[in-house]
Image (cartoon, rainbow, N blue to C red):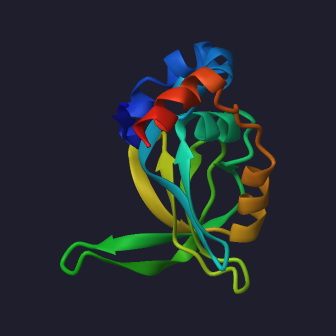
Amino acid sequence: MNTLTIPEVFSNIDFYKENYLSILSDSAQYYTEVENAHIHVWPIGEIKLHLGDLLQLWFSEKWLINSPCQLFLEDATRELYREAKQSLQRDHDLYLYQLEGSALSGSNRSKVWSESEQKSLVVSLDSVFKYYCIYKGTDQPIFSAQQILPFKSAV
């Protein structure tokens, strides 16, 4: 199975918009892996996000960050992140693809793709639990019996 990167997804975003419904209905396309796309929320654990998950969340604008968030700036000498003093807010530009933090404290360092800058940014969002709950509300295709049979024979 092919693994995509976030830059690859956004370089083909028009294709995904045109084929959105067929991707959501075809489990083989839906479950295409996307590198570094995941939810890791304490105490819930880690969940891998797939192409269909991301497209569903982005195109419904539920994981399109339009509210203010804190930007973490990269310190090139140490490859660490430090929190910026000003907030970041952009309309229809920041696409969440990696949600990491605590559901209890709300502290987080999540990754978004900035369409205007064509790069990933590390931000702190208002609530990781809110975005986790939005993800849980998505519909995911179920594998058909024909798709499961090869896995059973391998075991």
**Whether residue 46 is situated above or below residue 95 in the rendered picture:** below
* Left or right: 151 as drawn, with respect to 63: left
Q: Position of residue 28 (x, y in %)?
A: 53, 25
Residue occupying the point 68% across, 21% down: 25
The answer to whether 81 appears left or right of 101 in the picture is: left
Q: Say whether residue 59 is visible.
A: yes
106 relative to 19, above or below:
below
Which quarter of the figure is the N terminus placed in?
A: top left
Residue drawn at (53%, 67%), measured in percent from left and top?
123
User: Image check: 74 left or right of 49?
Assistant: left
Give the camera-side residue of 28 and 66. 28
The residue located at (70%, 51%) in the rendering is: 66
In the image, is residue 136 above or below residue 155? below
- In this rendering, the answer to whether 84 lies above or below 130 is below
Image quadrant where one finds the C terminus: top left
List the single residue furthest toward the left. Answer: 77
**Outermost residue, bottom side:** 105
Q: Position of residue 107 (x, y in %)?
A: 62, 81
